[in-house]
Amino acid sequence: MRLSHTTLSPRQLFALFVLFWIGLGWLGIILALLGIFFKTILMVYFFIFGLGLAYLAVVNSARIKFNRIFFLILCLLLGAIVLFSSFTTPTIFSGRDQGSLSEAAIRLAQNHQLEFSLPAADEFFKIYGPGKALNFPGFNYTQTGNLITQFPVGYIAWLAVFYSFLGLPGLVLANGISFFIFLLSFYLIARQYLRGSSSFIAFLLVLTSFVFSWFFKFTLSENLALMLLWFGLYQFVLFIKNAQQFNLLACFLSIGLLAFARIEALAFFAIMLIILWFHCQKNWRRVFSIAIGKKISLVFAGIIILYFFNLAANSQAYVALVKGMIKPFLAWQQNIGNPSEGWQIFYVARIFMAYDLLIFVFLGAAGFVSEWKNKKFTNLIPYLIVLPAFFYLLQPSVSADHPWMLRRFVFAVIPISILYALMFLERFFQRPAIFYFFSSALVATNLLIFTHYLDFSPSQNLLPQIQKIGDNLNADSLILVDKNSTGDGWSMMTGPLNFLYGKQAVYFFNPADLDKIDRSKFSVIYFIIPEDSLGMYRNSGILERLMPQKDYVMENSILTSHSTEKKYSVSLIELPDKINISTQGKIYLLKK
């Protein structure tokens, strides 16, 4: 595709629309790594490239024609994004990945660089030194005592771009744009292998699957991975069919950006190169000249250079990430033949069964085998590329609570299984009526879980309550916060108190640290302790040094799994309950 010509097809315009956002992601990463993450630069990008995209859309408006199915898909998708967003509370609370990623993005937007410092953090750095900042979940201490995220920069920069313009609602919009591009790319891939009606059903199965609507609510890198992986797959499939350099370039830009957010991208990219090598055997001169063309080579070299610069800028994060990736492989190798490993796999299967996902995994595998037996090898390409992600079925390497554990599978395993399940069903049921009946039953089954949790928003009213507590505290005081102060250790108030309301709030877990803090750096020291956690402070002798200042009550909404569930069991797993919890506690002042 020659972009010097302004006559473009709808497919090409869609690719340019996505590349506009991918370019924004690349710009965000570069600015973050250079320490010049300023809104003004982002505005210049929006102005120049946004105008260019708008110009191309206007010039080619007569060529943009939607059939009824595609128009319906756009309406359903936009409606779903609005609906999902209305039941989403930005996940900015400390304690788990989503809160740490949000905080890192907000800090980047505020400080214009990845590293930042806090008076409270300086005191705890003196205690613990470089490495993991235990009192600031999701962050590491640098050698100089600054805080830096322990996560890859890709998704953080993506969130920071939208936060820079819109504040907290921008975090929701960031996921909305990712989901929009993902599902359109998924549908367009499906159209390469399925009838139009079957592709629409595949679209509906993804749209009504609980996992996508659920993780839409969280600032997790899987949301960006959905967009980048599936657009990259779509462009790669087009390249294999048409051998157009633009498609390969778009694929590399997308998967390259994914490598800055998810380490699995390296495995996906390696398989793409292997497929390219085999594909070159048929038409090696043309494909080789395209793949090693000047533009592709420059992009490839640029991505590699930037990636190594990224590794150097935040080496602690990537060392920990590599260790985290290797650990499951080593554990799996050591535990082969161990009964506990079999129980682990069975537990994953039980989770999938509880959320009505297991049938898609089996049918998807059947679809893969069917295409292989029929020697339709080009139809296997998307499945082969994401195949490394299926290792998580054997060893998820993530906390076993659900639905949290399903995040490992949401951006690759589940979508590809749905796609190949439809490929299998379309071939298996020769009579369309039976195919539509079975497919409709799958959609209806999806809706049972989808609708049950659709309107549930975790920690929906928590932020105003945290702000109210913050109003009672001085900005120059040190605030030591118990993990369970909100009733949920995964949604602590420390982050928002700090980066939104300017308080020196710290997650406090080790009573021995109190006497190591230089109290002269702060006007006073407060403790926020719920009644259920008083035991630790009483046993350590801290409680007798505290004076109660103010009572507080926190109302929170969470999902909770059934306490009777066991990992090593054959019983069916029940879906989690939606509950409201009330936590009572006090704000204490440390006596001088």
Image (spheres, rainbow, N blue to C red):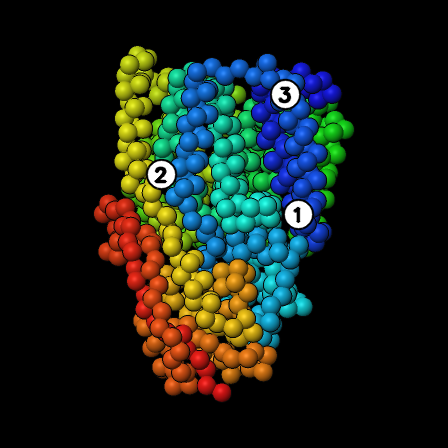
| Residue indicated by mark 3 | 58
The residue sitting at 66% across, 55% down in the picture is 113
User: To which residue does mark 2 refer?
Assistant: 210
| Residue placed most toward the observer, 572 or 541 | 541
Q: Residue 39 carries which label?
A: 1
Residue 213, image x, y percentages: 39, 39
Q: Which amino acid does label 1 sit on?
A: Lys
Q: In this view, does 420 lie above or below 168?
A: above
Q: Nearer the viewer, residue 439 or 113?
A: 113
Label 1 crowd bin: few (<14), some (14–19), many (20+), radius 10 Å: some
Amino acid carrying mark 3 in the image: Val
Looking at the image, which residue is at 51% across and 28% down?
185
Please count the marks in the image.
Answer: 3
Q: Residues within 10 Å of mark 3 (few under 14, many from 20)?
A: few
Residues marked 1 and 2 touching at CB (< 8 Å) = no
N-terminal-most mark, 1 or 3: 1
Helix, strand or loop under label 3: helix
Query: Disc 2 or 3, which lies upstream in sequence?
Result: 3
Quadrant assignment for the N terminus: top right
The image position of residue 393, as x and y in percent, is 40, 42
